[in-house]
Image: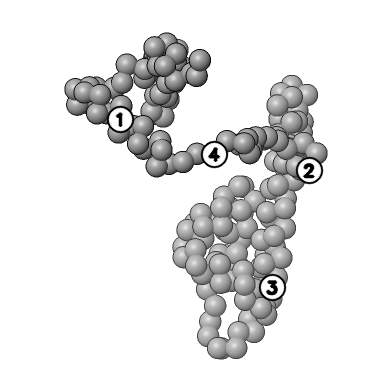
């Protein structure tokens, strides 16, 4: 490969040699990130980034070749994926979700809170303080709180904390309901 001659305004010699360009293009066409390709060519990632933004030769030819190498890699990977889609239909769905998100992307529906409910934080805090004042020993959870911390074997550990489930006491329910 022979890159065109240099036209840098500073007049200095560029590190973008035919040998370095060949190393970078080969690494990118094999699937390496640009940063890895730069390391293999013994230059800093920032240097490669500069080369991809500078105008003039040999940079514009190099930029075109890098984009072509990346496009070639993408084309080969898409061919492999689509070739396996009949055996693994989830690959077909993944491709459709990414290629045509307006039609195939997963939709998450989030329900808005009801408009008729209003919460007063001061009232809630007052009720919490009243429950604390009922004389429970410090550090104990109220009897209406159940921690669901069952451990299921065979599944990977879930790093999230256990969920708290609040179950109303029948005595409190009858007291709070008007008769």
Q: Position of residue 17 (x, y in %)?
A: 57, 71
Can residue 84 be seen at all in this image of the molecule? no
Q: Position of residue 109 (x, y in %)?
A: 68, 35
Q: Marks 1 and 3: which is nearer the front?
A: 1
Q: Marks 4 and 2: which is nearer the front?
A: 4
Residue situated in front as seen by the camera: 2 or 108: 108
Residue at x 66% of width, y 78% of height: 55
Looking at marks 1 and 4 on the same chain, the residue that comes earlier in the sequence is marked by 4
Q: Which mark is residue 60?
A: 3
Can residue 160 be seen at all in this image of the molecule? yes
User: Measured along the vertical axis of the image, is residue 112 above or below residue 171?
Assistant: below
Distance, label 1 to label 2, CA atoms, is 51 Å
Distance, label 1 to label 3, CA atoms, is 73 Å
Q: Which mark is residue 118?
A: 4
Looking at marks 1 and 3 on the same chain, the residue that comes earlier in the sequence is marked by 3
Q: Within the image, what quadrant is residue 34 found in?
A: bottom right
Residue at x 56% of width, y 67% of height: 49
Are the two marked residues, 1 and 4, in contact with CB atoms closer than 8 angstroms? no
Distance, label 4 to label 2, CA atoms, is 36 Å
Residue at x 56% of width, y 88% of height: 11
Q: Within the image, what quadrant is residue 62 found in?
A: bottom right
Looking at marks 2 and 3 on the same chain, the residue that comes earlier in the sequence is marked by 3
Q: Which mark is residue 130?
A: 1
Residue 179 in the figure: left or right of residue 144: right
User: Measured along the vertical axis of the image, is residue 168 above or below residue 57?
Assistant: above
Q: Which mark is residue 102?
A: 2
């Amino acid at each position: 490969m022979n890159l065109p001659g240099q036209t840098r305004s500073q007049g200095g010699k560029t590190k973008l040699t035919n040998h370095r360009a060949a190393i970078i293009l080969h690494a990118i066409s094999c699937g390496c990130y640009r940063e890895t390709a730069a390391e293999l060519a013994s230059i800093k990632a920032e240097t490669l980034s500069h080369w991809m933004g500078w105008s003039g030769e040999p940079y514009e030819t190099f930029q075109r070749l890098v984009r072509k190498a990346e496009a070639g890699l993408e084309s080969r990977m898409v061919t492999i994926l689509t070739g396996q889609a009949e055996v693994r239909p989830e690959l077909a769905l993944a491709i459709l979700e990414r290629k045509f998100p307006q039609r195939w992307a997963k939709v998450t529906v989030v329900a808005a809170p009801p408009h008729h409910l209003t919460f007063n934080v001061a009232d809630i805090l007052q009720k919490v303080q009243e429950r604390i004042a009922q004389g429970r020993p410090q550090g104990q959870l109220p009897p209406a709180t159940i921690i669901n911390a069952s451990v299921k074997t065979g599944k990977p550990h879930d790093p999230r904390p256990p969920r708290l489930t609040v179950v109303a006491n029948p005595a409190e329910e009858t007291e709070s309901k008007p008769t």
